[in-house]
Amino acid sequence: MRVSAKGRYALAAMIEIARQTRTEESVPVVVISKTLGISKIFLEQTVSQLKKDGLLYSIKGKKGGYQLAREANNITVYDVLAAIESGLLEKAGETVPHQSPSIEATLALRVWETLDDAIEAALQGISIQDLLDQSEQLGNDQAFMMNM
């Protein structure tokens, strides 16, 4: 499985939005862009797709920006990547369907479907809240180490 830069940036943006919206305020794209060092134009495309897929909503106006559409613990890594990565769990191509249908079926059942199921389960098992918590823990650990 290969995750594009857009998918990685989407996850980082979701974590940052979760972090900054604890106060119920929305986060403008320019703030996320500066905080994460991601191109504003590229980030706008990414958050637009996340909004279209119901993971974010936007607020217009002076205090406008983005907020999570659901609680951070109810949005999974799978949800985010599925919104951004069109071929996230694209089915493997056929190998020898005409020459050896039994080998083809075996590969599909024992390898490709097993792998797809494992990847999906792993990504479904990690929430944006999990990522935010770990990010903050790592940040606290690094701050502690810097002060030693």
Image: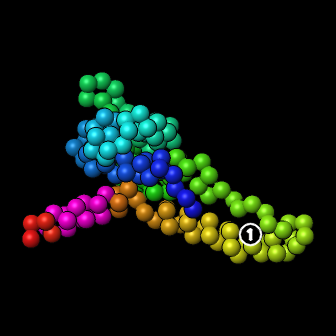
Question: 98 or 124, which lies in front?
Answer: 98
Query: Which residue reaches farthest left?
Result: 148
Residue 26 location (% of width, % of height): 29, 37
Magenta run includes residue 140: yes
The crowd level at tag 1 (other Cα within 10 Å; few <14, some 14-19, many 20+) is some
* Three-letter amino acid code of the residue under disc 1: Ala
Which region of the structure is painted magenta? Answer: 132-144
Mark 1 element type: helix
Viewer-closest of 23 and 136: 136
Q: Is residue 73 among the parts visible in the rendering? A: no
Q: Answer left or right for 147 relative to 89.
A: left
Q: Residue at x 52, y 46 (%)?
A: 84
Q: Which of the image's four quarters has the N terminus? A: bottom right
Residue 3 versus residue 103 in the image, above or below: above
User: Residue at the spot x=70%, y=75% of the render?
Assistant: 110
On screen, 124 above or below 55? below
Relative depth, front residue between 17 and 87: 87
The dominant secondary structure in magenta is helix
Q: Which residue is at the far top? A: 61
> Label 1: which residue?
108
Position of 142 compared to 66: left or right?
left
Would you identify the image quadrant in which residue 68 lies? top left
Check if residue 133 falls in the magenta segment.
Answer: yes
The C terminus appears in which quarter of the rendering?
bottom left
Q: Residue furthest right?
A: 99
